[in-house]
Amino acid sequence: MYDFAPAADADKSTLYADLLSAADALTAGEPDPVANMANLSALLWQFLPDLNWAGFYRMVEGELVLGPFQGKPACIRIPVGRGVCGAAAATGETQLVADVHAFPGHIACDAASASEIVVPVKLGERLIGVLDLDSPRPARFDRQDADGLERLVALVAARIG
Ligand code: SME
C-alpha cells in the first residue's frame, strides 16, 4: 500500500501541490488506465475533505460510462448533454455547480450530494472522459479546486486514456 497523505492544516494551494505530486508519483510509468484511474480516485478521496463521490466516467462509443470511483454505486451510463457530467462532456468545459438541485437535468446518483464539480479529461483535442467529484456540502468547490483538478487531469490524461 502507498502512504501518501495530505499535510495537516494545509491550505488549498499546498493541498493541490501535494495532490499533484502524489498523483504523478503514483501513475508515472504505469500504462494501465484502469489501475491509474482507480488509484487516482482513492487519492482524491483521501486528499480532499467533504466528498461523497470521486471518480471517472469514460467516453465509450459516444456516451459516458462509469469508471473507477470511490463512493456509493452510481449511474452507469450518461448520455452526452445530460446532467452535470454530460454538460462537461458536451461543452468541454469544467462545470462548477454550487447547488446541484438548481442544475437543470442533474442526475442524483447519491441523494446526499449538494454540490459538484466535473472536469473534462482531454487527450489533445479528444475528450476521453470526465472527472466527477460530489460533496454533501453546498458550494464545496471553488475556482481554486477547478484549477487544481484541471491541472491534475492534464498531468494524468495520457496515463488514463
Ligand atoms: N450527478 C452527476 C451524475 C454522476 S454522479 O454524481 C456520480 C450528473 O448530474 O451528471
Image (cartoon, rainbow, N blue to C red):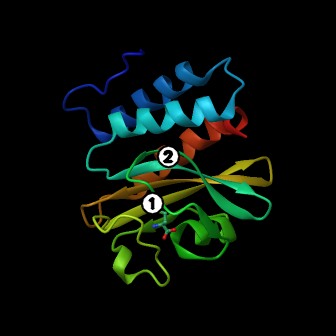
Give the quarter of the figure containing the C terminus: top right
Disc 1 designates what residue? 117
Q: CA distance from mark 1 to mark 2?
A: 9 Å
Check disc 1 and give the amino acid type: Ile
Along the viewing direction, whichever of 138 and 60 lies nearer the viewer: 60
**Does the residue at mark 1 contact the one at mark 2 (Cβ under 8 Å)?**
yes
Q: Residue 86 appears at what percent x and percent y?
A: 61, 70
Q: Residue at x 27, y 37 (%)?
A: 11
Mark 2 Cβ and ligand 1 under 8 Å apart: no
| Towards the viewer: 79 or 40 | 79
Mark 2 Cα shell of 10 Å, populated few (<14), some (14-19), many (≥20): many
The structure residue drawn at horizontal position 40% and vertical position 27%, both measured from the top left corner, is: 18
Task: Give coordinates of residue 93: x percent, y percent.
Answer: 61, 64
The image quadrant that residue 68 belongs to is top right
How far across and down, in percent of the image, does residue 52 sit? 32, 53
Left or right position of 96 against 110: right
The residue at the point 60 percent across, 29 percent down is 35
Q: Position of residue 83 (x, y in %)?
A: 53, 74
Residue 149's tag is: 2
In the structure shown, which secondary structural element does the residue marked by tag 2 occupy?
A: helix
Q: Characterize the local packing of mark 1: few (<14), some (14-19) or many (20 or more) Cα atoms within 10 angstroms.
A: many
In the image, residue 148 above or below residue 82:
above
Foreground of the two, 56 or 13: 56
The quadrant of the rendering that contains the N terminus is: top left
In this rendering, the answer to whether 86 lies above or below 49 is below
Label 2 is placed on what type of residue?
Leu
